[in-house]
Amino acid sequence: MPFVIAVDGPAASGKGTVASRLAALYGYPYLDTGLLYRAVGMALLRAHHDLDDPIAAEAAARLLDLKALADPALRGAVAGEAASRTARHAGVRAALLELQRVFADQEPGAVLDGRDIGTVIAPGADAKLYVTASPEVRAERRWKQLTAQGEDISYPTVLDDIRRRDARDAGRDAAPMKPAPDAVLLDTTDLDIEAATDAARRIVEAARAGRVFRP
Ligand code: CDP
């Protein structure tokens, strides 16, 4: 049975960093599932389709070419917003489900990060983390990342984007962003990358040992 690590949480909470470091530590493959939704959103934008059109969005998800995931434009703010708008459609989520489940079902294990990994994609995951941080700290991290990528965007705009995206992701009907009942919460507001990774590793080690982690 593969050992599956599910890492969920809101934008710029540190989940991607934690997930990729856990994957490197255990030698498991890592899937950033947000990239799938970002790629669908960008495909729709480029084809001048309406992001709110469920039929066009589902068709784009079914036609998704995994080579598109390497596109650096997917890391930008426009792609993040487009992803969140297309990720609301149940048909889009259904189209991307199997690919994620197959990824999770690899020996000896896999790490996936997203919004619904512990709840929908891999509800039987061996270790579930819900990584969060205050909106202000997340906005600061995302603003630094976007400006380092060359985007011209202000901190207040990034904070607004994050708040709007949190509300949309948590409020949708299809696989809303929420911690699985058995997820361990990891608040990275006051943690740097090393400390967050260390805390995440301890949560996973506790799960490996068959214990429930008590911070
Ligand atoms: O990096 P960041 O956390 O900002 O975003 P992301 O993980 O790349 O996800 C972008 C958007 O895709 C999110 O705001 C969600 O709306 C959507 N998403 C989702 O619905 N389910 C997932 N498993 C991953 C992402």
Image (cartoon, rainbow, N blue to C red):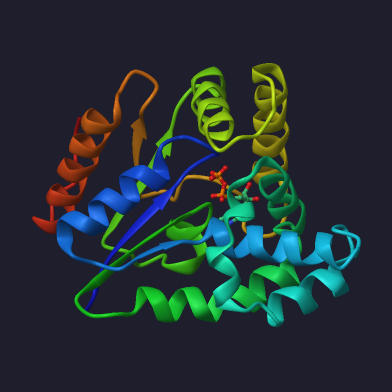
Q: Position of residue 89 (x, y in %)?
A: 76, 63
Q: Nearer the viewer, residue 182 or 148?
A: 148
Check the image and report above or below for 13 versus 1.
above
> Which image quarter holds the N terminus?
bottom left
Q: Position of residue 71 (x, y in %)?
A: 59, 62
Viewer-nearest residue: 164 or 31: 31
Question: Which of the 4 image quarters holds residue 200?
Answer: top left
In the rendered image of this protein, does residue 92 appear above or below residue 136? below
Q: How many marks?
A: 0
Q: Relative to residue 24, is residue 151 drawn left or right? A: right
74 relative to 148 in the view: left or right = right
Relative to residue 175, is residue 90 depicted above or below? Answer: below
In the displayed structure image, the side of residue 130 where residue 12 appears, left or right: right
Residue placed farthest to the front in the image? 150
Quarter occupied by the C terminus? top left
**x, y percent for residue 30:** 35, 63
Q: Is residue 133 above or below residue 128?
A: above
Identify the residue at the far left of this view: 209
Residue 19's spot in the image, x, y percent? 33, 51
State the residue in front, 76 or 15: 76
Q: Give the side of residue 137 with respect to residue 39, left or right.
A: left
Give the residue drawn at x 71%, y 82%: 63
Residue found 87% across the figure and 74% down from its top:
55
Give me the residue at 70% from left, 36% from top: 167
